[in-house]
Amino acid sequence: MKYKSQKIALVYFAVAMGLFAIQVLGGLLAGWIYVSPNTLSELLPFNIVRMLHTNSLVVWLLLGFFGAAYFLIPEESEREIHSEKLAYLQLLILVVGTLGVVVTYVFNLFEGHWLLGKEGREFIEQPKWVKAGIVVAALIFLYNISMTVLKGKKTAITNILLLGLWGLALLFLFSFYNPHNLALDKMYWWYIVHLWVEGTWELVMASILAYLMLKLTGVDREVVEKWLYVIVAAALFSGILGTGHHYYFIGTPGYWQWIGSIFSSLEVVPFFAMMAFAFVMVWKGRRDHPNKAALLWSLGCGTLAFFGAGVWGFLHTLHGVNYYTHGTQITAAHGHLAFYGAYVCLNLAIISYALPVLRNRDPYNQVLNMASFWMMTSGMVFMTFVLTFAGTVQTHMQRVLGEYFMDVQDSVELFYYMRFGAGLVVVLGAILFIYSMAVPRKEIIEAGSAETPAE
């Protein structure tokens, strides 16, 4: 660890891993409710379980991004973080807000209250007081890292990372605007949901992946930066107007069907470029880095993001296809693999790289770490195929033949059992990852104690 303030990232990663465990366990419970619908129906209804699953996903990914920023910006800027105290204050606000959200959701507190009660908008159901806290935390974070970068060395990686993080924070402000007109509400709602995951988050992803390639492969910075600018340009060019693929049938003008179809088809390009970038950097690289697990997660990130966000997104992005498939299990298949590939793998890659540096020891138990990669990835890929087949059957029976929704659900029940089995493998893989990162190998402990002189 070159800079003392990099240790801030350790706390962020620890909290993120705790929420990661909660998120996958919540997903497993939601998967079981699909099989056995009355499970915990009185104590913890499905809509609450789903909110906890999706909200904890978003929060732990954001905490991972923040931790990554606090880890890599000192190295890139060649100076300490502007204020460590502000970084810990930011984390405290986010943790308090997260706890408030969980308590509000689970016990259904303050129902209908404009300030304290949850809202009914998917992914941004948080009470207004929590949203205000998130904005304060975001402002603290942006001030802290912006001052660090402005006073230090500026690189393409820090510039793109700052652009992505500033965009992420500014777009969240739309969560406070909730118009009465439902079409207008959904139009602005997608400004957050789409322009996060297919806009600003892609910039964050590209910059962190570029940093990892720089460290793990030894390729010249100039080469990495050229790739980075091309990827970012493609992401913004396709992603901004690609928002139109959510505007097909929400009451917006018909021209969005063409704009959405054309530009969202181009969204495959930046994800293909990121996959190609990762493999070309490894191929060109001259460094035999000891951290093979971080390299595996990085390559997995590029590959699975291309298939999950790119290929599976393209499967139902054209408006003629989307007319039949939107809101089916095909959407769930795309969403699961896209989030896992692009952002879960990215965070686990930077954590796998950073933790040995932060804890000043050799790369942990890499065998267990890499085993967790193959467990989670195989489980998620199998789940994606299962949901794709379920969605295809659902689309034909429900949207084409016009059969009743619940009759169709009974027909695809076998797929839900398989989805639950795949989810169980993902959860075991996640637990294995956390164990491999938290518990050092026995031989590392013995080597460290042998080298430490007796006091």
Image (cartoon, helix red, strand yellow):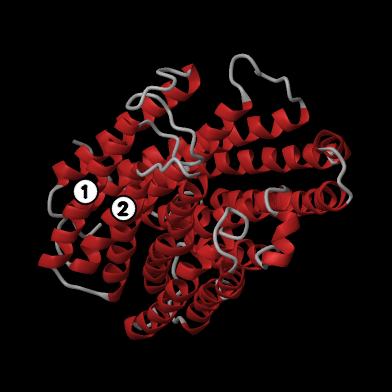
The picture quadrant where one finds residue 38 is top right
Which numbered tag is attached to residue 139? 1
Left or right side of 117 for 453: left
Give how far apart the Cα atoms at labels 1 and 2 are: 8 Å
Can the viewer see residue 361? no
Quarter holding the N terminus is: bottom left
Residue picked out by circle 2: 169
Which residue is farthest left? 151
Q: Compared with residue 209, is residue 330 higher up or lower down, i.e. above or below?
A: above
Crowding near pointer 2: few (<14 within 10 Å), some, many (20+)? Answer: many
Can the viewer see residue 400? yes
Q: Secondary structure at mark 1?
A: helix
Q: Compared with residue 273, is residue 197 higher up or lower down, i.e. above or below?
A: above
Q: Mark 2 belongs to which amino acid? A: Ala
Left or right side of 168 for 70: left
Crowding near pointer 1: few (<14 within 10 Å), some, many (20+)? Answer: some
Residue 42, given in percent of the width and then of the height, sits at 63, 14
Q: Secondary structure at mark 2?
A: helix
Residue at left offset 16%, top offset 72%: 153
Residue at left offset 62%, top offset 56%: 249
Quarter holding the C terminus is: top left
Residue 275, given in percent of the width and then of the height, sits at 55, 73
Viewer-side residue, 235 vs 225:
235
Which numbered tag is attached to residue 101? none
Left or right side of 77 for 296: right
The numbered mark, 1 or 2, whose residue comes first in the sequence reads: 1
Residue 348, given in percent of the width and then of the height, sits at 47, 53
- Whether pointer 1 and pointer 2 mark residues with C-beta atoms closer than 8 Å, the reply is yes
Q: Mark 1 belongs to which amino acid? A: Leu
Which residue is farthest top? 42
Viewer-side residue, 433 vs 411:
411
